[in-house]
Amino acid sequence: MKLTIITSSISNITPIFRREFSSCLNSPIAYLFAAVFLVATNWLFFQSFFLTDQAVMRQWFGLLPLVFLLLVPAITMRSWAEEKKSNTVEFVLTLPIRDFEVVLAKFLSSLAFLALVLAFSVTLPATIGHLGDIDAGVVITGYLGALLLGSTYISLGLLASSFTRNQIVAFLVSLSVMFGLFIMGSNQVLGFVSGPTAAVLQFLSTASHFDTLSRGIVDTRDVIYYLSFTALAVYLTVQVIGSRNWR
């Protein structure tokens, strides 16, 4: 019975996933931000790479939480906002599929596009590997952390997009929320608080958990944090779409 349900869900998710992924591939804005992401991160990384004289990518991974603040909202802002503006959302949600399957398909398609953008950057560790002895384990862990961070940001971006018909509003709202989660664990913020409050803010910060993974350390607490945050945001998106209050 469970296998039948899973098979049915996969069959429902697949065509919407293909539709959404094709939409990402055909979006000039997404390509623009992807190009800016690759050029900017590589340029900033090589500004200091030859000065450190070390075959490591930690500084490159350190740029991702900030760069993702612009890249991910650009990917997700049109997911629901464009559907509502063009009134195609009514057609999608009247298909014989469940709301969570539509939301999951949109989430997976955005994550797949982000993974594709990250895949274009593998030339960087390949280049560094020719210049020195690079630790492949740290690089793999860093990319794993990037995907986990990206999945959290994508789920938040989809949630923001589900509240509005305007792509720019969706972009700005998701950017604001992601930025807030990013800076709450920074020294500038933690300097004004102490004790349990500081511990809570540091735990909620997306950057704090990514820092551990970017150093090649896989801590189950960090993985659980990202997966839980992603699941919560996806669940809330399903509730927003299911309420139909956006009509």
Image: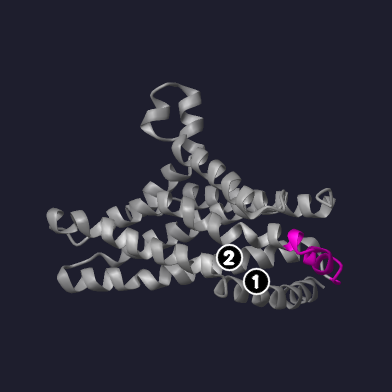
Please give left or right for residue 167 compared with residue 57 in the image: right
For the residue marked with disc 2, what is the amino acid? Ser
In-front residue for pair 233/41: 41
Do the numbered discs 2 and 1 sit on residues whose CB atoms are within 8 Å? yes
What residue is disc 1 on? Answer: 20
- In the displayed structure, 246 sits above or below 19; it is above
Where residue 90 appears, as percent x and y from the top left, is 83, 64
Where residue 206 appears, as percent x and y from the top left, is 48, 45
Q: Residue 154's image quarter?
A: bottom right
Secondary structure of the residue carrying numbered label 2: helix
For the residue marked with disc 1, what is the amino acid? Glu
What residue is disc 2 on? Answer: 110
Give the class, few, some or many, for how many residues have Cα within 10 Å of label 1's Cα (few <14, many ≥20): many
Question: What is the tally of numbered marks visible in this picture?
Answer: 2
* Observer able to see residue 217: no
Q: From which residue to which does the magenta span run?
A: 83-96
Q: Residue at x 47, y 72 (%)?
A: 116
Please give left or right for residue 145 compared with residue 92 in the image: left
